[in-house]
Image (tube, rainbow, N blue to C red):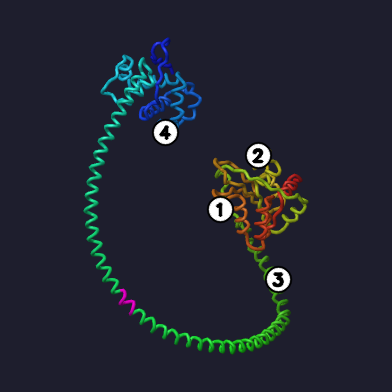
Amino acid sequence: MTEDVVNEGDASAPAEALDAPLPAEVRQRVVSLAAFALGTLAAEEVPPALKAVARFTPTKRARTGSSQLAAALEADPVFRHRVAAVTRNQLPALAEALDRGERPHAADPVEVAALAYLLRPPGWTTVVRHAADDVADRARTSTAGEADAALARLTDQLEAARSEGRAAVERTRAQAQRDAEAAAGVRRRLREAEGELRRLRSVTDAAVAAAERAAEETRQVQAAAAVEARRLRSRLADVEAALETSRRAAREGRSAESVRLRLLLDTVVEAAHGLRRELALAPATTRPADGVGGITPDAAGVGDLAARAFAADDPAMLDQLLALPQVHLVVDGYNVTKTGYGTLSLVEQRNRLVTGLAVLAARTGAEVTCVFDGTTLDVRVTQASPRGVRVLFSPEGETADELIRRLVRAEPPGRPVVVVSSDREVADGVLRSGARPVPASLLLRRLDRS
């Protein structure tokens, strides 16, 4: 932005200066013009003290940065020149008149003084003083008119107050008459209330005597009831002893019957297995975990979950757990990958873990579900689900820990479920639901053996 040069008179002449502060209205207008001009300057043209103020809107600059703007205009001639150049473009006619040494009488004295302060043509201090005098005269004229108007208003208010006072006196007299009549009525009702109170006291004394008699009768009934309760408790103890004796005899009598029922149950089970082979029934193709609402791998990207590791154990224990019939292995995906190979990218972590789980599922025949945290997914991902491994991402609003707990709760009681996670909260939660938690290091050592 090219800096405009503002005429400030002959450089050899002594600099003009005001002998009194700017009037408040003139100073406010100068700050407003500077606030507007500040927004039009390039960044390198803004004084360092006004860098923060320049980020505000013009109105907020004038309101919150008035002191900084006024100080910069007084102390920084270059900044004042730039503001004057912008203001000259806003008020070209008035600026030209001031350059010619004229002071338009029809112009607002505040506007004339503010522009003269910024442009500083020869004799500008005189222009500012005259404008200040005009502002003061206008204020005095306005004050006198306001005083006359205020006097008229006060006169009207005084007359109205007098009228209201007379009316209030009449209302007070009428109210006093009504209060005297009401007081007489109150005294009459008070005498009636005192008579009613004496009657109620008599009734109350009779009621208290009756209540005391009733309390005595109640105490006698309670004593009799306590005696009867002790007799009934003694009889109940005898009945309970007889019942326990009969139960013991019934259990001894049922022992032979239990052997017969167990034999019948074994026969039915063997017959069911034979019937399944005879009918060539196919094994179940759906599992309870298929009905739990997780996000499939192509739904969205995967976030991160910090691991809280336990001590590792012998991987042979995992082999024993996976050898259980119909076992379901649930893996906290990112908990395992962050423990074993957290330096890889998320995609490489997922691929490496899922590939290792596929080999483990093929060797053990266990049902395997790998759960990844989907709470931070923001893009769709492609994650292959190899044969024997179910890959799930937690849906929006749910963490992988919560999805793992839902998977465990979905299984029928008695089915062996193994959850791989070094997260103490996950391990404690699934343990309460009947699952067996194992640390991530155990699975990693087992996969390394594969």
Magenta span main SS:
helix
Name the foreground residue: 62 vs 146.
146
Query: Of the residues shown, which amino acid type is indicated by label 4?
Result: Arg
Residue at 51% x, 86% y is 212
Q: Say which element carries label 2.
A: helix
- Say above or below: 21 vs 288: above
- Marks 1/4: CA distance? 57 Å
Q: Which residue is mark 4?
A: 63
- Whether residue 285 is visible, yes or no, is no
Q: Quadrant of the C terminus?
A: top right
Numbered-mark total: 4
Q: Which residue is mark 2?
A: 348
- For disc 4, the neighbor class at 10 Å (few under 14, some 14 to 19, many from 20) is some
Q: Which residue is mark 1?
A: 293
Q: Which residue is mark 3?
A: 266
What residue range appears in magenta? 186-191
Residue at 36% x, 80% y is 194
Residue 379: x and y in percent read 55, 40
- For disc 1, the neighbor class at 10 Å (few under 14, some 14 to 19, many from 20) is some
Query: Of the residues shown, which amino acid type is indicated by label 2?
Result: Glu
Residue at 54% x, 49% y is 397
Q: Quadrant of residue 85?
A: top left
- For disc 2, the neighbor class at 10 Å (few under 14, some 14 to 19, many from 20) is some
- Marks 4/2: CA distance? 57 Å
